[in-house]
Image: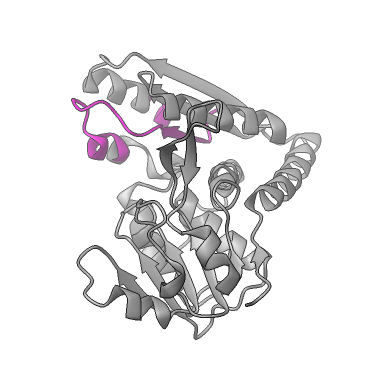
Amino acid sequence: MTNYQIIDGKAISDQIKQEIALEVQQIVANGGKQPHLAVIIVGHDGGSETYVAHKVKSCEQVGFKSTRIAFESDVTEAQLLEEIDKLNKNADVDGFIVQLPLPKHISEEKVIEAIDYRKDVDGFHPVNVGRMVIGLPCFVSATPAGIMELLKRYDIPTSGRNCVVIGRSNIVVKPVASLMMQKAYPGDATVTVCHSRTKNLKEMCLQADIIIAALGAPEFLKGDMVKEGAVIIDVGTTRVASTETKSGFRLKGDVAFNEVAPKASYITPVPGGVGPMTIISLLKNTLLAAKKEVY
């Protein structure tokens, strides 16, 4: 039994917010431009509305200007692309995002590719994804950037370590696997990506010094799949019905926390681990965009 340490994403995110707020104060005091993030939201998905509200509130907390642009779910693809074009051309807007998911009749791919990659602070544009893979300056997508930041802030060694990433999503798994193998810190790890078709997943996980679980299956990673002293990063957030909460649901991660934690050296809780870091990454990217440090 090891004494595991909680990786506290909430505490780290509060700390970074203070760092960003201080920097914005200095920029504005020196006559610089206040960073400006715009968010487009389509329809009334509960999760999306909550996320967007959080993003707008976080902008206020760090001294950014924010604009929320809302469309009903029957907006046409052409109308949405027109709005994106306006934001691309608006010199005051440093970065903007389109909150996903979008209604079925709108192509997410088309929308993402319509965003000027120099303002794509979500880091989803193929130019940013490609630059990240070959190690060029870019906007890294929020969750992978947040995970790297947590590893860094907790001084978790990654060089030469075996890292297993479970899942194969474009938004989390492919970028984080790529970042973990880059010649940098955090990075320099030996990375294995496992997914639903992996034959010997348990054996793979038992070899891992670091496990990043991002498959979206509640409590998938069990205690018998983890070796003593492993570092566990839980990216899963599945809403599970619950009678104990006011909302009627609770968030469950991809890790069976009570089984896995006693074997871990470090572990992220759900909620309060990786989650709070995603908005931080968005703020950091917007600040980089405002300072023209990437493009």
At horizontal 53% and vertical 35% (from top left) the residue drawn is: 94
Q: Quadrant of the N terminus?
A: bottom right
79 or 206, which lies in front?
A: 206
Q: Which residues are magenta?
A: 86-112
Query: Residue 282, image x and y in percent?
Result: 54, 43
Q: Is residue 140 visible in the rendered structure shown here?
A: no
Q: How is the image coloured?
A: one colour
**In the picture shown, does residue 289 fall above or below 132?**
above
**In the picture shown, does residue 4 fall above or below 208?**
above
Q: Is residue 100 left or right of residue 288?
A: left
**In the picture shown, does residue 189 fall above or below 257?**
below
Q: Is residue 198 left or right of residue 227?
A: left
Residue 108 lies in quadrant: top left
Query: Residue 155, image x and y in percent?
Result: 67, 72
101 or 183, which lies in front?
A: 101
291 or 254, which lies in front?
A: 254
243 or 228, which lies in front?
A: 243
**In the picture shown, does residue 131 fall above or below 237?**
below
Query: Residue 146, image x and y in percent?
Result: 55, 55
Q: Is residue 58 left or right of residue 175?
A: right
Query: Residue 222, image x and y in percent?
Result: 42, 66
Q: Is residue 249 left or right of residue 131?
A: right
At horizontal 20% and vertical 28% (from top left) the residue drawn is: 104
Indicate yes or no whether the magenta region holds residue 207. Answer: no
Q: Is residue 211 visible in the rendered structure shown here?
A: yes
At horizontal 68% and vertical 72% (from top left) the residue drawn is: 3
Residue 56 lies in quadrant: top right
